[in-house]
Image: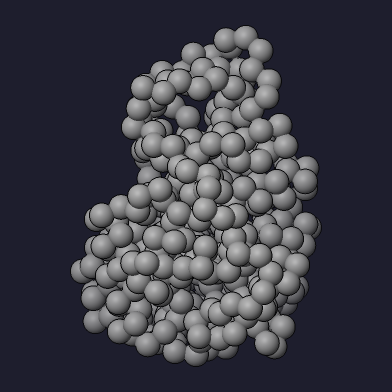
Amino acid sequence: MTTLSGRLVLPEGVMGAQIEFGSRIERIEREVGDQAGRYILPGFIDTHVHGGGGGDTMDGLPGIAALARLHARHGTTTLLPTTITHPWERVMEALRAVQGAMQDGVEGGADIVGAHLEGPFISPQRLGAQPPDTLAPTPERVRELLDIGIIRAVTLAPELSGALDAARAFAGAGVRVGIGHTAASFEQTAELLAALRELGGRACSTHLYNAMGTLSGREPGVLGALLTDPHAFHELILDGHHLHPGSVRLALQAAPGRVLLVSDAMRAAGLGDGESELGGQPVRVSGGAARLANGALAGSVLTLDTALRNALALGLDLPQVSRMLSGTPARSLGLADRGRLEAGLRADLVVLDEAFEIQEVYVAGQRIPQGGGQ
């Protein structure tokens, strides 16, 4: 049994408390004196992360282990290794590797609860930094994916042939359906969102604003449909490069309690500036921004502890930011055993100092070593 004291970030606010835990939280004793000096938060949940620490989901088991360890050191205690558009067999190989990592676990790494399939079911008109190996979500491909049993989130472009039926099939299997990398109209997007609501499915934007066009008075498009949906969750990449602060505030006002922070990190996360790659494409990281040769953003090198500090710098309060990093992503995936500091839940914890820098991280009660790089 481990005991920590500090300022706990609880659903009702921040307060001095002591927390006791093994693999699960056993007891929280509140208001136990002056606890200045550190904050204790629920572990971060990243629903969209391609890589980090030199590894990538598409590398197979070694790459998945590398990214799980790197992001755990930065406070992410649960994550979904995320694919990129590639030929179908390459995607399936990556998913089988995620399955293996789930079964065996990653020592010193975040808990892997499934995969996020981002690609190949995206629009060739909105590739962003993804390779051009897009495919339609045929019933056969959807069934092959569901038979693996590890897909927790999927990204679909609503305008693709078969997308509506695919969304229904994924939702029926409990998969969060993301809308992204799309050139769909308002009407196409709204139709898919309505189908998900009818099934009680969970809808989410995939990195809201990015790779989905713009909103105008006569053409509200994908953004208009997403931001007016009363139930959709929204991923934001808060790295200081992908989003204007005004766009962040718009999302928070349009979807209170339904905004979650993601890293969308690539293999260069944690390695500093220099040359890297994404999906076989050369990438240059400079000043914390990862770009292709044509200047397009290539995912990010973000970790979620930096996203937390960026959110605080925008004027958001710590309990709100903690929900965006933990409670809301847990709800978006249907994970009831984590995302809050509460007796009986998993002991996934992040300890921060007064400057909101990582001091300690626990995954199911096991402390993550803080050495081994950035």
Q: How is the image coloured?
A: one colour
Task: Decide which of 172, 195 is in the foreground and name it.
Answer: 172
Quadrant of the drawing holding the C terminus: bottom right
Taking depth in this image into account, of 205 and 36 the one nearest to the observer is 36
Residue located 69% across and 69% down the image: 273
Would you say 203 lies left or right of 26 here?
right
- Above or below, 152 against 337 in this view is below
Q: Where is residue 275 in the image (x, y as percent from the top left)?
A: 63, 78
Identify the image quadrant of residue 8.
Answer: top right
Residue 371 image position (x, y, % from top left): 53, 48
Residue depicted at x 58% and y 11%: 31
Residue 202 on image: x %, y %: 42, 56
Tell me which residue sits at (62%, 35%) in the image.
Answer: 352
Residue appearing at x 49%, y 82% in the figure: 279
Total marks shown come to 0
250 vs 343: above or below: below
Residue 314 visible within the image:
yes
Q: Is 59 in front, or is 198?
A: 59
Please tell me which residue lies in front, 35 or 343.
Answer: 35
Left or right: 103, with 273 as reference point? left
Coordinates of residue 345 in the picture (x, y in percent):
37, 32
Looking at this view, name the residue that lies furthest to the top: 33
- 248 versus 24 height, above or below: below
Residue farthest left in this picture: 147
Name the image quarter holding the N terminus.
Answer: top left
Whether residue 348 appears in this view of the structure is no
Residue 100, picture quadrant: bottom left
